[in-house]
Amino acid sequence: MSDFDMIEKIGILRKKRNAIILAHNYQRPEIQDIADFTGDSLELSIKAKNVKEDVIVFCGVSFMAETAKILSPSKTVLLPVADAGCPMADMIDIKSLRELKAAHPAAMVMCYVNSTAEIKAECDICCTSANAAKIASKIPRESEIIFVPDANLGAWSEKQSGRKMILYPGFCPTHVRFIPEMIIKKRSEYPSAALIVHPESSPDVSALADAVLSTGGMLEFARLMPYKEIIVGTETGLLHRLEKENPDKKFIALCEEAVCPNMKKTTLAKLMLSLENMEEEISVPEDIRQKAEIPVLKMLSYS
Ligand code: 13P
Ligand code: SF4
């Protein structure tokens, strides 16, 4: 079947199922283009909470679809590829989290949205890369903070908020590819370019950037700042939107190999089959969902 035919069929099925297609900024270009809404994790959570349609097809990774289900339990949430996961989210299990909590019984637990529903259910407040420092600064000063699972985002929020954190040693395999030498090389090739990186990058990389931003923040930076050339340190899927929305500007990937294989699993064919067969339906046990909803709603109330 050609792409053209699949796009047509997806359009028909989307109406038939009364579905909305949500896509993360790292999805393949053709998926971003067909989606009803493309955004960063925070924007997607807000959108998922307020959808009118009966079905949410989430083109992203499993924790995102789970978060949509946590926030909109009455909707059918589909993840087109069942094994599109996030290796960082899988780096922490419930046993390790409970051990950490037991070692710091008075600490508040802040979890990155890149975590399973089961982990969220054990945490006090959630955050995304767009609001981590702001959320940390809302936690009472006298309280210790445990941050899971991304040590790099945790370190960045620690620096921005001035709050000391107990960091769990998780990381994003895609963003830790960035190393300072890449920055030095790109800066010498494009001396007048701005250089922006995602806070999942390691602290020595973030320290060398002009701005450290979520993917939504990067899109805003590109739109509002006067730079004609921008070096982009995040998953390369974001370049599609950056280029589409800013045709007069040049975007350079900090590293062409910074690709998240899980984000790229969703294809037009998988999306079409998902709508056709109503697969893979995401379910979260109701007791876990209710507990996981608390930190996510708390985050949204501060956003
Ligand atoms: P944001 O789009 O929220 O910046 O997140 C990046 C990411 O890695 C999602 O998995
Ligand atoms: Fe997870 Fe990193 Fe992929 Fe985001 S880019 S989904 S954090 S592995």
Image (cartoon, rainbow, N blue to C red):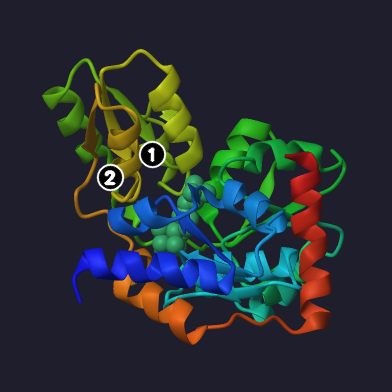
- Describe residue 266's horizontal placement relative to residue 256 as left or right: right
Which residue is at a point 33% across and 65% down the rendered structure image?
8
Q: Is residue 16 above or below residue 212?
A: below
Q: Which amino acid lies under the numbered mark 1 shown in the image of this protein? A: Asp
Q: Which residue is mark 2?
A: 179
Q: Earlier in the sequence, mark 1 or mark 2?
A: 2
The residue lying toward the viewer, choosing from 45 and 235, is 45
Q: Nearer the viewer, residue 41 or 142?
A: 41
At 68% across and 32% down in the image, what residue appears?
162
SS under mark 1:
helix
Q: Position of residue 220 (x, y in %)?
A: 47, 28
Which quarter of the figure has residue 253? top left
Quarter placement of the C terminus: top right
Looking at the image, can residue 159 be seen? yes
Counting labels gives 2
Q: Amino acid at mark 2?
A: Ile
Q: Which mark is residue 259?
A: none
Q: Secondary structure at mark 2?
A: loop
Residue position for label 1: 204
